[in-house]
Amino acid sequence: MTDASAQFESRLSACPACDAAPLAGRLAQAGPAARGDIVLSLPTAHCAVCISDVERALTAVPGVRDARVNLTLRRVTIDAEGLTAPDLIPVLDRIGYEAHELDPGALSATAADRHGRDLLMRIGVSGFAMMNIMILSVAVWSGADDSTRDLFHWISGAIALPTVAFAGQPFFSSALRALRAGRLGMDVPISLALILASAISVYETFHGGRHAYFDAAAMLCFFLLIGRYLDYRTRAVARSAAEELTALEVPRAIRLTDGAEQTVPVAELRPDDLILVRPGGRIPADGVVTAGASEIDRSLLTGESVPVAAHPGQPLSAGEVNLTGPLTLRVTAAGQDSSLARLTALVAAAETARGHYTSLADRASRFYAPVVHTVALLSFLGWLWATRDVRVSLNVAAAVLIITCPCALGLAVPAVITAASGRLFRAGLLIKDGTALERLAEVDTVVFDKTGTLTMGTPRVDNPDALDGDARAVALALAAGSSHPLSRALAGTLADTAPAALDDLREVPGYGIEGRWQGQLVRLGRADWIGAEGDAPGAASWLRIGERVQRIDFTDSLRPGAEECAAQMQAMGLRVMILSGDGAGAVADIAARLGIVEWRAGVTPQDKAAVIAELAAEGRRVLMVGDGLNDTAALSAAHASISPASALDAARVASDMVLMGAGLAPVADAVGVARASVRRIRENFGVSVSYNILAVPIAIAGFATPLIAALAMSASSICVTLNALRLR
Amino acid sequence: MEVLAFLIPVSLLLGALGLVAFLWALRNRQYDDPKGDAERILSDEWDDQPKP
């Protein structure tokens, strides 16, 4: 593992609880943006037209000095004076590009870039050295001898030694760390081979020997660094996008001090503080309503799709969304005591239960390193016993180490993972964890959350035809006056009718909207307020015109691609089930539409994690797909997990993969790609092993020349890379 | 074989030139957005003169 990967692990997976709790003081790092730079994420940009569209639209805005799209990261950096992201997002929205504001302070792109450039520089230096030494080596191989050969060896050595010292540093430092920790990683045999090859070659050159392995040392560095870089690059792209997701939400609260509003970081809230939550805002801490009435969307916490009413005296939990009216809350628990933090503690527990997954590469290197060392040592001892010649024996041992050095093995996994994650990234799926693909390939059961995952979390009117002409006009006029999700959906459906002229239009937070139409009282809202029989199984709203009461039903619209995804997964032989915190009616409806037989409704967050654990105990490997806080524990307990980009950051942090687009179709593809890539990784291991079986006996027998080593090394590396590229 | 005295330094110099060019490109952030650069060549904006 390199430095970068170690940092990555500790940032993302080692402590999801820290990342998951938005209260923990992330704000401390989020400094002000440098020189008016705005960074926006562009999840849908993918081609040349997108680049010029976005750049042209942005530079046309007065005040924008420069806009530059980075397609690799799917980001645009805008240099603008006196403008903020909310001014520019609508500009992109108008030309059809989804854009999200990113907090530049939370993006540590520069540090990551530096490491990538550092690796690239080492690749460049070792590539230069390799090619120049190879020119001289070819001359030696084709028959240069005596002083010419010695001269060429000296020049090669003069190039190779500084190169190995510089380009080999990532391997040396990582080998040293491994040794200090008492382990034998892949880097120990690599470092040993580099050092031994250089040392033997210097000795041979001094004594006018026939073989020098300077070219092999430089080539080893070159190929292995390429593997390292691919590995790093996959992680860097995933990490920057993951950072993007956490940079999307800046946790702040509005605190009321003696009636004055003050915006403070959520981490600074204390119990008994009074906070104001505006309509559309997320409740930042647990509290009791002291003033105001509204409706609360708890779908991210519990999976319920029907909003509940909030009145003074009612306790609310952090993470719920306030829908209609402003609410004043007295904080009862903030930070570590809040229900949000309790849920994240659940996540941490589930995370430790999952334990450490040993990747194929780790397993291979755990087996590989001792074998290589033993073989090299045995051939040294064997030759020493047979010839009593330390120089010959050391030469053979060095040849064995160089031949067995895991060039192909070092490329086998990164090349496949890079090709596979590139393909999934283009499909809109982001891999956050290096071993995620391998785990995904083993999955045999898929568990879906309903609200926000299989559905969009946005309601749709079921029975628009039940309303006649006047009722439509009145309903539209009423609905247009509210920002409640049901009202917005109704207004959207009825957009083609002309609204009726209403007087005295007012919203009664927590109940609905009322007005006067041709002298009659008209209302749109909750059943008990309208005066209707209020036992609705799903989401519904009532319309009252005078004495006439009509019911309008809503269902959650399916996420695009959900049907195909469910069908495709079942066709692949996966067991598909739905676990939802919502009511039985709504879940049964969605399950029927998707053709999913197994479902459970009214499941608590703890139950979800317990179901996953039960399935795991039955020997099943579960893929969990979910978006809410109530799914977070289940996401971390599952063998592999995916969450949509619209999910809460806690859920995204807990999952291995994030779905960037709105469609669900890539999820089923991902399982197929993951299985294909694990097949490729195994094939690549097969190539490396069979190459070793062929080449090692030659080396042990003492017939290995630098020419054979160079041919074998490059041939196997190229084979492995080409095999990986078949995935694209 | 005296020609080697010229040819070897020349070949090393050419290689070093390539290396310097690579390091220059690296430091000038030419490798920051390979995908974007591959696509930008297809756009006919700024074909007549470089972007100011």
Image (cartoon, helix red, strand yellow):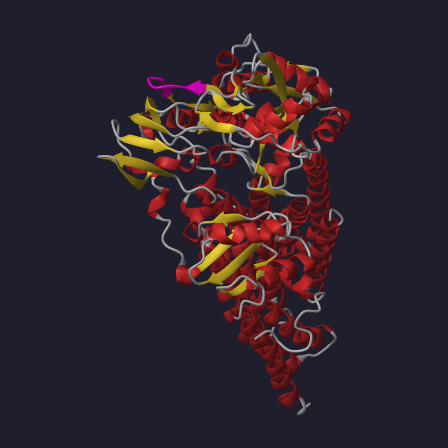
Which residue is drawn at the image coordinates 52% and 10% (left, top)?
Answer: A531
Residue A498 location, x and y as percent?
Answer: 65, 33
Q: Is A215 in front, or is A500?
A: A500
A164, above or below A417, in the image: below
Residue that protrudes farthest toward the left in the picture: A258
Q: Quadrant of residue A328?
A: top left
Magenta residue span:
A309-315
Which residue is drawn at the image coordinates 48% and 58% (left, top)?
Answer: A115
Q: Is A276 in front, or is A38?
A: A276
Which residue is drawn at the image coordinates 67% and 37% (left, top)?
Answer: A663
Using residue A269 as the reference point, say whether residue A523 is left or right of it.
Answer: right
A222 magenta-colored: no
Residue that protrudes farthest toward the right in the picture: A571
Residue that protrudes farthest toward the front in the picture: A519
A315, above or below A125, in the image: above
Residue A649 location, x and y as percent?
Answer: 48, 36
Using residue A298 as the reference point, say whether residue A445 is left or right of it.
Answer: right
Which residue is drawn at the image coordinates 64% and 48% (left, top)?
Answer: A44
Residue B21 location, x and y as percent?
Answer: 58, 76
A444, above or below A90, in the image: above
A314 magenta-colored: yes
Please indicate, yes or no, whether residue A626 appears anywhere in the rendered image.
Answer: no
Q: Is A142 in front, or is A207?
A: A142
A567, above or below A48, in the image: above
